[in-house]
């Protein structure tokens, strides 16, 4: 109510102060109560400049290593000319502080390590091969893709962005990942499957494409990296089994952890079904939970599988 009152008092429709408060109000209105309570009403919720946090870490024998969200690290979110000027700042901590000020970055999830080691802040691109991968890219015109030749293929990315691939090796990687719909696949198996799909006998071409593009796409939040393959299954069995932590928490909260270790918002009916997916209850039993003769059950189960909640 206070925010609405202040916004109404702003004399100009596009006043920056008004627009900023309107964004805050939108966040409050669209976020779950648990998020609002945690982010805005915690008893300990103090603000620090990035350089202040680094000083506090140094005092106890620790140092900043990097950010848990790769896109938020240096220069990944600013125009090229700005990034070029930032690169002239020798001290990496000062560079990060400047980025916060330039883009109004108010929240960080930082990785820290002991002060006695020398951080490698620019990772080796080949390390992408050590991980399992997911993709947030979907081909805009799947039927037009011909993996037997190089093409200019458009993929829809996060935030309504478009990513284009011109070599069939890179396109094949993105196609295989898109078909998995969020289920991680180890990088080496991904390379093999993509090479097979593109009819490439030499897997090194696909491997090179992944090494060249992998970390760039991770930083652009188009690829996700995982320590290992997750246990979720894309299929719906006769007696579905859901990820145990999500099943146990379904009666208490709407944001639930999937087997991919991400959080998803589920509506009341979906949570009822999820809580009953114990590996012993068949579809008719799950339909009884909904009380609608099972009309909505197939769509709900398909949604749970797509989001990584079903493990059997």
Image: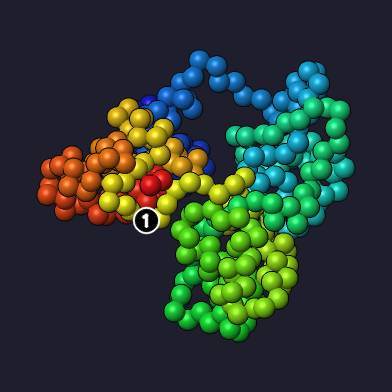
Compared across the picture, whether 173 is left or right of 42 comes to: right
Q: Position of residue 160 (x, y in %)?
A: 49, 61
**Foreground of the two, 267 or 3:** 267
Q: Position of residue 277 (x, y in %)?
A: 30, 40
Circle 1 residue = 235
Image quadrant in which the N terminus is located: top left
Compared across the picture, whether 239 is left or right of 162 comes to: left
Residue 256 location, quadrant: top left
**Foreground of the two, 286 or 94:** 286
**Foreground of the two, 227 or 178:** 227
Q: Is residue 18 above or below residue 42?
A: below
Q: Residues within 10 Å of mark 1 (few under 14, many from 20)?
A: some
Residue 190 location, quadrant: bottom right
Q: Is residue 157 above or below residue 36?
A: below
At horizontal 65% and vertical 51% (from top left) the residue drawn is: 131
At horizontal 67% and vertical 78% (from top left) the residue drawn is: 201
Residue sitting at the far bottom:
149
Does dot 1 land on a helix, a strand or a loop? Answer: loop
Q: Is residue 68 above or below residue 6?
A: below
At horizontal 75% and vertical 20% (from top left) the residue drawn is: 56
At horizontal 53% and vertical 69% (from top left) the residue drawn is: 175
Q: Is residue 22 visible?
A: no
Q: Is residue 284 visible?
A: yes
Residue sitting at the far front:
280
Q: Position of residue 161 (x, y in %)?
A: 53, 62
Residue sitting at the far top:
43
**Number of numbered discs overlaid on the protein picture:** 1
Q: How is the image coloured?
A: rainbow
Q: Position of residue 258 (x, y in %)?
A: 44, 41
């Amino acid at each position: 109510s206070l925010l609405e009152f202040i916004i109404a008092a702003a004399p100009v429709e596009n006043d920056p102060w008004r627009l900023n408060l309107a964004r805050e109000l939108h966040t409050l209105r669209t976020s779950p109560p648990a998020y609002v309570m945690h982010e805005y009403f915690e008893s300990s919720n103090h603000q620090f400049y990035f350089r202040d946090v680094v000083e506090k870490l140094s005092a106890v024998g620790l140092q900043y290593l990097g950010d848990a969200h790769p896109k938020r690290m240096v220069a990944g979110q600013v125009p090229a000319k700005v990034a070029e000027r930032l690169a002239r700042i020798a001290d990496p901590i000062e560079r990060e502080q400047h980025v916060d000020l330039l883009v109004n970055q108010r929240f960080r999830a930082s990785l820290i390590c002991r002060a006695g080691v020398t951080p490698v802040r620019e990772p080796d691109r080949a390390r992408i091969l050590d991980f399992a991968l997911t993709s947030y890219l979907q081909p805009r015109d799947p039927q037009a893709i011909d993996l037997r030749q190089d093409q200019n293929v458009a993929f829809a990315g996060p935030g309504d962005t478009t990513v284009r691939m011109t070599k069939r090796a890179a396109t094949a990687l993105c196609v295989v990942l898109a078909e998995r719909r969020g289920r991680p696949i180890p990088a080496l198996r991904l390379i093999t499957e993509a090479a097979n799909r593109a009819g490439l006998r030499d897997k090194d071409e696909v491997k090179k494409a992944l090494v060249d593009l992998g970390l760039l796409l991770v930083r652009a939040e188009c690829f996700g990296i995982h320590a290992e393959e997750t246990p979720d299954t894309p299929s719906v069995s006769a007696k579905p089994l859901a990820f145990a932590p999500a099943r146990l928490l379904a009666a208490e909260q709407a944001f639930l952890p999937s087997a991919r270790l991400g959080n998803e918002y589920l509506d009341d009916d979906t949570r009822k079904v999820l809580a009953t997916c114990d590996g012993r209850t068949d579809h008719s039993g799950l339909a009884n939970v909904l009380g609608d003769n099972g009309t909505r059950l197939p769509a709900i189960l398909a949604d749970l599988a797509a989001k990584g909640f079903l493990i059997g």
